[in-house]
Image (tube, rainbow, N blue to C red):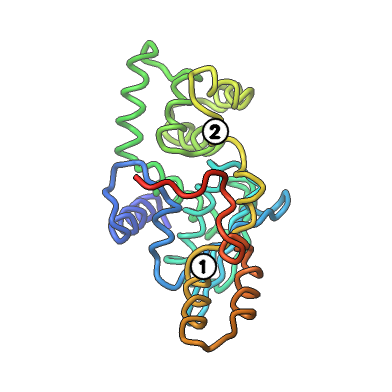
């Protein structure tokens, strides 16, 4: 697909999920609204970013939770391309490094993810806004603000800025160092650049949990089997209760 096609598809999916074509998005909240989709977070090692499995009645997206939150968000957008627009696959396992996939579908998925998280018009406007404050050029501070605004990893934003002819390869390379420090020195927290807590690195959401609850409510499985299903999905919190200190807060 060419870039115009991928940009169009990214906008179409944004609209389908109830989002406008400009604003930064909470992609994890969006995917939980997709019917018949189970989302699994699991640490998958150093070579895999995620996978997508398409079935007749339900689908699964798995994300490598050992990666940074920014990279996980990009992986999720990448897998959404496979889920909605890759008609040639039933199961795909995706490379950890952005841009490392050799197949056309992997390159398309990366470009789609970039457009889905950073719509071209929104990115251009943000670049202009931040450049005006930095002597009409992109500095490390500008890049930090861009990645924080769109909630993407440093690698994702640098690749896109090179594509948009806003940075050279050499300029981008110089900004790949001291990523976390460059953010915290501007007053941001470092959560975008780190994995989630260990407790949340093993977690399942969506259709599987809904189905387990439904079969239990209909008395199709025993309480013991229901708990087994939840534990298989790493949801001990639903079996043993909320373990968060202080309990639930009511507004």
Give the residue drawn at x 49%, y 32%. Answer: 162
- Mark 1, Cα crowd under 10 Å, few <14 / some 14-19 / many 20+, is many
Q: Residue furthest top?
A: 135
Q: Give the left or right position of residue 121, taking residue 53 as reference.
A: left
Which percent across, then down, holds residue 150? 41, 37
Binning the other alpha carbons within 10 Å of mark 2 as few (below 14), some (14 to 19) or many (20 upward) gives: many
Give percent across and percent down for residue 219: 51, 87
Number of on-image labels:
2
Q: Position of residue 160 (x, y in %)?
A: 47, 37
Q: Which residue lies at the image location 34% right of the left edge and 29% below the top edge?
A: 126
Task: Judge by depth and name the residue closer to the eye, 188 or 3.
Answer: 188
| Viewer-closest of 28 and 110 | 28
> Which residue was labeled with disc 1?
38
The residue sitting at 46% across, 60% down in the picture is: 80
3D distance between C-alphas at marks 2 and 1: 28 Å
Q: Is residue 88 visible?
A: no
Relative depth, front residue between 106 and 206: 206
Image coordinates of residue 175 in percent, x first then y, are 57, 23
Looking at the rendered structure, the secondary structure element under dot 2 is helix
Lower position in the chain sequence, tag 2 or tag 1: 1
- Left or right, 144 with respect to 21, comes to right
Q: Which mark is residue 240?
A: none
Q: Relative to 160, is 219 above or below?
A: below
Image: 43 above or below 206? above
Residue at numbered disc 2: 154
Q: Is residue 180 in view from this perspective?
A: yes
Mark 1: secondary structure: strand
Q: Is residue 169 above or below residue 22?
A: above
**Which quarter of the rendering shows the N terminus?**
bottom left
């Amino acid at each position: 697909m060419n870039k115009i096609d991928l940009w169009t598809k990214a906008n179409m999916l944004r609209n389908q999920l109830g989002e406008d074509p400009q604003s930064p998005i909470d992609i994890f909240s969006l995917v939980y609204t997709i019917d018949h989709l189970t989302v699994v977070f699991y640490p998958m090692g150093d070579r895999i970013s995620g996978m997508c499995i398409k079935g007749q009645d339900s689908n699964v997206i798995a994300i490598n939770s050992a990666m940074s939150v920014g990279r996980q968000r990009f992986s999720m957008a990448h897998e959404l391309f496979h889920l909605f627009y890759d008609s040639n696959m039933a199961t795909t396992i995706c490379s950890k490094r952005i841009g490392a996939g050799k197949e056309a579908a992997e390159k398309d998925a990366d470009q789609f993810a970039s457009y889905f998280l950073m719509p071209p018009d929104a990115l251009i406007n943000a670049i202009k806004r931040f450049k005006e404050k930095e002597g009409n050029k992109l500095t490390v501070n500008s890049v930090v603000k861009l990645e924080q605004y769109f909630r993407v990893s440093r690698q994702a934003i640098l690749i896109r800025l090179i594509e948009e002819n806003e940075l050279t390869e050499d300029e981008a390379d110089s900004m790949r160092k001291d990523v976390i420090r460059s953010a915290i020195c501007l007053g941001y927290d470092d959560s975008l650049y780190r994995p989630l807590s260990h407790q949340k690195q093993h977690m399942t959401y969506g259709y599987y949990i809904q189905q387990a609850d439904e079969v239990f409510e209909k008395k199709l499985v025993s309480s013991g089997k229901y708990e087994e299903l939840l534990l298989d999905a790493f949801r001990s919190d639903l079996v043993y209760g909320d373990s968060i200190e202080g309990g639930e807060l009511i507004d």
